[in-house]
Amino acid sequence: MIPFVNLTGQREKYRFELEKAEREVLESGCFIGGPQVEALERELSEYIGGTFTATCASGTDALTLALMTLGLQPLDEVIVPDFTFIAPAECVAFLGGIPKFADIDRQTLQISPESVKKQINPRTKGIIAVNLFGQCAPFVKLRKIADEHGLWIIEDAAQAFGATANQTKACTFGDISITSFYPSKPLGCYGDGGALFSANKDFILKAKSLANHGSTGRYNHQVIGLNSRLDALQAAVLRVKLKHLDEELPLRRQNAAKYDAFFEKYNQGAPSNKQIIPQKIAKGNTSTYAQYTVLAESRDYFIQKLDAAGIPHCIHYPAPLHTQPCFSDKQPRPNSEWASKRTISLPVCAFTDVDSIIAKLNF
Ligand SMILES: Cc1ncc(COP(=O)(O)O)c(C=O)c1O
């Protein structure tokens, strides 16, 4: 069985370092916050450069905390991509705001700046831009729009810690940026975890306080907050994996390049209704390839072939957000609808043998 993300292969490689780090935490008696979490926050800031960091309990919480830090109020509108995981839209709605869905670009699958512009009205407060599948959103254009309309940007880099755009690291493009340490993410722990990043120290101090019951000191609660803390065991695991991230990312990119070459050759001989087109990586971007996602004209046919070869696959995402029953904005977003019928993702992590997957693919 080929795993979609080979976490056991990764653990095997770092076993000695991981077990040492885990043992140290278990024997320290310090399980929430403390030196491991502080060291991780320092190391994450150093990795990104020029940023302050607050860890928290998940990527979803990081988005919620970012919105709370930026002062989102009930009925405020926030523009989010229509084609992504639910969390960005969910967090806005959870806080009483209204998510407005922007359509996407059919090639990069990223939020479309033109569609963002169309959603802006006097109630709009900001944009949450997702670095989908590991590729940074078009932040130059988005920042221009945000500045013109006095909006903030939250960069959702849940899938893209370690990505770059024009040699600038992900997690630096938002007024606040966030990531997720969900186990299968490019930098993942062994449970839930997340972080917020900002060049604005006050934002990070506020987010830290909000993540700790809105407290500014022991039993002193200025505002209503959450319990959203990263635990020391996750921090210790992440510190080990962070050291190896820049070894893993080139391997992910090499694996993606192998698929690219394979599908390019395949498409030359395939009829138009069987073409398989990889997500376009825009010029100047390097992706983390959270997964390797393609647009398959005949997705069911492709799935049959993958199943016959025992190759795992996932559909990210089978339904645009505006079609989810929990949201009321039902206006059509044609590109997002188009993509949701075609996308399919393949394994690509640093511990995946892509050569053997390609050898099994037989159309
Ligand atoms: C784009 C995006 N944002 C936010 C999240 C939420 O992260 P978490 O699962 O850590 O809450 C995810 C998780 O898959 C995601 O893909």
Image: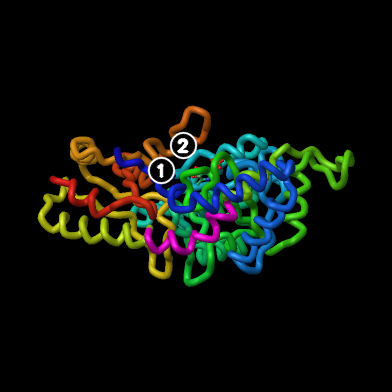
Judged from this view, the residue extending furthest toward the top is: 325
Examine the residues drawn in magenta and state their main secondary structure.
helix
Q: Are marks 2 and 1 in contact (CB under 8 Å)?
A: yes
| Secondary element type, mark 2 | helix
Image quadrant where one finds the C terminus = top left
Q: Residue at x 79, y 38 (%)?
A: 224
The amino acid type, in three-letter code, at marker 2 is His
Q: Residues within 10 Å of mark 2 (few under 14, many from 20)?
A: many
Task: Give the amino acid at mark 1.
Answer: Arg
Q: Which mark is residue 53?
A: none
Question: Residue 79, relative to residue 173: is it above or below?
Answer: above
Asked if the stretch drawn in magenta spans residue 2, the answer is: no
Question: SS of the residue at dot 1?
Answer: loop
Which percent across, then down, holds residue 312? 30, 40
In magenta segment, residue 242: yes
Q: Is residue 97 visible?
A: yes
Q: Which residue is mark 1?
A: 333
Using residue 155 as the reference point, say whether residue 136 is left or right of it: left
Sequence-wise first label, 2 or 1: 2
- Look at the image and give the residue range highlighted in magenta: 238-251
Residue at (54%, 53%) from the top-left corner?
A: 17
Q: Which residue is mark 2?
A: 322
Name the residue rendered at 49%, 72% in the picture.
Answer: 167
Q: How is the image coloured?
A: rainbow
The location of residue 122, given as percent across then percent down, is 64, 50
